[in-house]
Amino acid sequence: MNGPLLLDDIPNLSPLLGGRGLDAGGWRALLWTESGPLGRPVAMATFLLNALTSGNDTAVWKWTNSMLHLLTGLVVFWLSAHTWCIRNAKPGPRCWYAALVIGAVWLLHPLQVSTVLYTVQRMTQLSALFVFSGLLAYVLARKQQLEGRSGYPLLAVCFLVFLPLATLSKENGALLVPLAFLVEMCLFRFEGTTQARRTLAVGFGLFLVVPLLYGGFLIIRHYEAILVDGYLVRPFTLQERVLTEFRVLFLYIQQLILPIQQTMGFVHDDIAISRGWLAPPTTLLSLAGLSALLVAAWLVRDRAPLVTLGILFFFTGHSLESTLLPLEIAFEHRNYAPSYGVFVAMVAAVAAFAPSPGMRIGGSAVACAILAALTLFRVQTWASEVTLLSYTYQTHPDSERVNAVFAERLTGAGRYQQALALLESRDGAGAALQRLYIRCLMDQRIAAPDIDAVSASLQPFVDHYVASGLMEVGRLGITGVCRLPHARYAELVERALKLPVIDPTTRQKLLMYQAHYLWYLEEADAALETLRRAHATQPGNVVPLLLATEYLLHLRRTQEAQAEFERALQAAAGLPVPYSGLVRRVEEKLARCTRGGGCPASTSGAVVLEPQTDNVVE
C-alpha cells in the first residue's frame, strides 16, 4: 500500500494530493481529466473523495483500490453463478462452485496487481465494476423474462445506470453493450416472448447498432484526426500496431494461463514492433493461434457455450484498446475485465472435458493456491519504488522507460557516471537529452556542440521522453544550475516544435520554455508571441497569460499587461490551485505598477513548469 505513484498517477492525481484546489469551487475542475474524451468524472469523483478524507496519504488511495477489487470480485462471483446455470440442465450448487472458482481465479491472479496497485487505474477498476454489474443486471432481467416476468426494471438499470457509470469511469465501459449482446447470443439466444424479443431488438438497436454506425461515421469523417495524427507521434504505423497486437493478445493469454513472472512487468515498451507478417515470424503464428481460438469457439458453441462466451468476451474486451487506436502497444491493466473471459472459458472447458469431479476440484484448489502465492510475491515487489524498479529492470532490461527511470534515480543519488553508463548504449533523442542533463549537472555547463548533436538526433516526433529531457535541461539553465548557450537552446526547442508533439499540453510547456530563453536573449516581442502561441495551444491554461503579463510589466507596457491579465482571469475562472496563487501574485505586481509603486525589475524564472516524466495518457 505504500508503493510509489507512477506514470499517469502524477499528472492526474497531483492536483488533488495535499488537498490543493479543493476550495472556492476549484473541485469542480478536478472532476474532469484529459485522460479521455469524456473526462472520466465518476473515477475522478472517487479520487476527490480520497483527497478530502485522507489528503496525500496515498496508502489510503491504494487501499480504496483494493476494496474496489474485492467488491468487483463479489460481482464477478455472482455473475458467474447466474451465467453458469442458464443452459445447465441440472442447476444447483455446482453453479455456485464453478462461480467460486472463477471469482477466486479472477481475484487472485497476479496480473491484476499492476491494475489494483497502479493508483490511477481505479478508472479501469470502476469501469470493470460497472460493466460486470450491468451484465449481472442484464442476466437477471433475462432470467425474469424467461420466467414470465417483465424484467424491464433491471434492463433499465443495465443500460441507463450502469452503462453511463462505466463509460464515465473509463471509455471502454461502453463495451458493456456488446458484451451483453454476447451473453444473449451465446446463452439466452433471444428466447422468450415476442414482446421480450422486440424489446431486446429495440434496445440493442439503440445502444449497439446506432453507436456503431455513428462511430464508423466519425472515423470516416475525421479519419486523420482520430487515427492518422495520433500515429505521427508513435514509433509504429497503424498497420504495424495491428500486426503487433496479434502477438500482444497472444502474450496476454499466455500471462493469464501460465502466469510466469518473467513475462510480466509494469511496462512492456520493449516489445518488438511487427513490421510485417513474418517480421518477426511470431506475428503470423500468433494470428493463426488467435484464429484457431475463434474457430474453436464456433465449434463448441452448442456443447460448451460458456467456452464460446469466454473466448469472445476476451476479444471483445480488447476491441478498443488493442486494435486501431494510436495507444501504446501493451499494458497489463488492459486485461482487468477481459481476463474474465479467459477464466470462464478455462473453467467451462475443464467442467466439460475433465474426466472426474475429484480432478476438477483438486486442480482448482491447487491452481488457486499457486495464484495466491504468485500474487503475494508480486505484491511485495510493489512495496516501494526501489523494489518495483529493481524487479521491472530484471524482467525488462531493454525497456527504454525503465532505463530512463533507473538513470534518473542514479542521477538523483549523485552517481552520474553509473547513470551515463546505463544510458550509453541507448539510441534516440530522449536518451541523448538525458545524457546531456546528467553532464550538465556534472560540469555545470553545456557547450554549443553538445546541443547541436542533440538537435541532429531530433526525429521524427517528440514523445514524452524527449519533451521531458528538453524541459529538464531548460530548467537547469533557467535556475542557474548549468550554464548553456541560450540561443542554441531556443533553436533546439524551435526545431522540436516543428515536429509532431505527443500532446497539446506538452507542446504548450515547450513553447513556454522557449519563451523564457527568448526573453533572456532580449527578444521581448518574440517571447510574447511565443507565449500567445502557447496559450492558443491550451486556452484553458492561464500560465502563459500570467507570464506574458509579467513580461509586459517589466517592459512598462501597463495597459497591455492589464489586458493580458484580464484574459488570464477569464481563463482561470473555476480552475484549481496552483493557478489561484499565481493569479494573486501577478495581481499584486500589477497593482504596484498601476499605483506607481514600481514594476518588477526582472521576471527571470517567474513561472517555470516542472516537467512531467512519463506522462502516458490512456
Image (tube, rainbow, N blue to C red):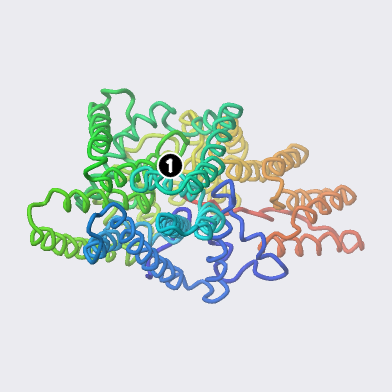
In the image: residue 172, left or right of residue 296: right
Q: Residue lying farthest right?
A: 595
- Residue found at x 69% / y 71%: 23
In the image: residue 368, left or right of residue 231: left
Quarter of the figure that contains the N terminus:
bottom left
Q: Residue lying farthest bottom?
A: 53
Place of residue 493 in the rendered image (x, y in percent of width and height, measured from the top left): 58, 37
In the image: residue 260, left or right of residue 487: left
Callout 1 environment at 10 Å: few (<14), some (14 to 19), or many (20+)?
some
Figure quadrant of residue 569: bottom right
| Amino acid type at image mark 1 | Glu
Reading the image, the residue beneath label 1 is 321
Place of residue 496 in the rendered image (x, y in percent of width and height, measured from the top left): 56, 34
In the image: residue 190, left or right of residue 99: right
The answer to which of 258 and 434 lies nearer the viewer is: 258
- Whether residue 469 is visible, yes or no, is no
- Whether residue 371 is visible, yes or no, is yes
Figure quadrant of residue 239: top left
The answer to which of 58 and 450 lies nearer the viewer is: 58
Place of residue 457 in the rendered image (x, y in percent of width and height, measured from the top left): 46, 30
